[in-house]
């Protein structure tokens, strides 16, 4: 649930960018948000009293990560091979959305991962607000997010055009960083109070949700299947997001290995993001 809430900015920016229409900006924002979320989790490792990997709920994160890898593979196949039916909406994004929804339902039935033994139960110290108060707050915040997201997407499109930058680079680096600000607050806040498991689950849940936004973008894009309109810069951003997820999941096999005070997975993600963003900048 937290992952879906913190991904609300991506909903607005992705739909707006596709409707402009700037499909490269929309898709690169999706893949850039996935990579930026992992970067946030990696940087949050510095704020954790112990390497964050020791607090990660392995089973839950691995399930979420494998689903994210699967739907990213479907997106990549759609970009490379094109849509087989040639309709106004591609089959790939719809399949991705369906897989993500079913996965969330199944994971909800499995149940949330229990907190680590040394993680505090902060819920005991919080006063439970009324349902009406929660709904009103969410509605107000949601309205602000929708408006701000639309403005951010239009500004990013104008910024790329004025400076002659590739939309794929602007969406991956600049727009993705802006729309990932809620994850910064939620992740750093959770790590600082000792809820590293919640932080990791939030990031990987957000990444699943973000990839499903390709369906939202495709519905907003009126010039044919979205994936058919994407080029090599977006494909590179997708490959980077896939590689970072795979690297972090692989590093979970060695939770005791660290580089300095952070886990090896966090170190690989930080280095991989910097190298990948530099490659996108050169391509753009």
Image: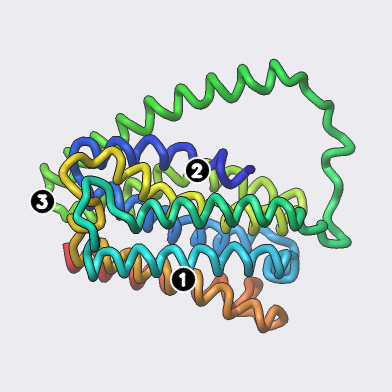
Q: Could you give the CA–CA distance between mark 1 and mark 3, rounded to whole angstroms?
A: 28 Å
Q: Nearer the viewer, residue 204 or 227?
A: 227
Quarter of the rendering occupied by the C terminus = bottom left
Element class at badge 1? helix
Q: Residue furthest front?
A: 85
Q: Nearer the viewer, residue 208 or 195?
A: 208
Q: Please report contact status of discs 3 and 2: CB closer than 8 Å, yes or no.
A: no
Q: Nearer the viewer, residue 100 or 126?
A: 100
User: Which residue in the structure is indicated by mark 3?
Assistant: 164
* Place of residue 108 in the rendered image (x, y in percent of width and height, measured from the top left): 70, 51
Neighbour tally class for label 3: few under 14, some 14-19, many 20 plus, Cα within 10 Å: few
User: Which residue in the structure is indicated by mark 1?
Assistant: 244
In the rendered view, how is the structure colored? rainbow
Q: Please report contact status of discs 2 and 1: CB closer than 8 Å, yes or no.
A: no
Asked which quadrant contains residue 144, the reply is top left
User: Which residue in the structure is indicated by mark 2?
Assistant: 7
Q: Viewer-nearest of labels 1 and 3?
A: 1
The tag earlier along the polypeptide, 3 or 2, is 2
Q: Viewer-nearest of labels 3 and 2?
A: 2
Is 210 placed left or right of 135 in the picture? left
Q: Could you give the CA–CA distance between mark 3 and mark 2, rounded to whole angstroms?
A: 28 Å
Name the residue: 28% across, 68% down: 236
């Amino acid at each position: 649930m937290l992952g879906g809430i913190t991904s609300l900015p991506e909903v607005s920016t992705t739909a707006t960018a596709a409707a402009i229409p700037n499909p490269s900006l929309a898709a690169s924002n999706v893949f850039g948000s996935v990579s930026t979320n992992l970067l946030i989790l990696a940087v949050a490792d510095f704020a954790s009293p112990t390497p964050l990997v020791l607090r990660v709920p392995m089973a839950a994160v691995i399930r979420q990560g494998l689903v994210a890898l699967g739907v990213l593979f479907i997106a990549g196949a759609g970009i490379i091979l094109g849509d087989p039916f040639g309709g106004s909406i591609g089959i790939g994004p719809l399949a991705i959305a369906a897989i993500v929804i079913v996965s969330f339902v199944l994971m909800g039935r499995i149940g949330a991962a229990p907190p680590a033994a040394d993680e505090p139960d902060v819920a005991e110290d919080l006063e439970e607000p009324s349902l009406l108060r929660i709904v009103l707050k969410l509605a107000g915040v949601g309205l602000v997010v929708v408006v701000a997201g639309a403005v951010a997407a239009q500004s990013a499109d104008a910024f790329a055009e004025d400076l002659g930058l590739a939309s794929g680079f602007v969406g991956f680096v600049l727009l993705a960083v802006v729309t990932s600000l809620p994850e910064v607050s939620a992740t750093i806040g959770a790590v600082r109070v000792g809820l590293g498991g919640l932080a990791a689950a939030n990031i990987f849940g957000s990444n699943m949700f973000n990839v499903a936004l390709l369906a939202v973008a495709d519905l907003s894009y009126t010039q044919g299947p979205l994936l058919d309109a994407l080029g090599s810069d977006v494909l590179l951003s997708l490959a980077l997001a896939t590689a970072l997820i795979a690297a972090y999941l692989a590093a979970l096999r060695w939770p005791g290995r660290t580089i300095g005070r952070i886990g090896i997975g966090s170190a690989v993600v930080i280095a991989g993001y910097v190298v990948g963003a530099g490659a996108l900048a050169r391509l753009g």
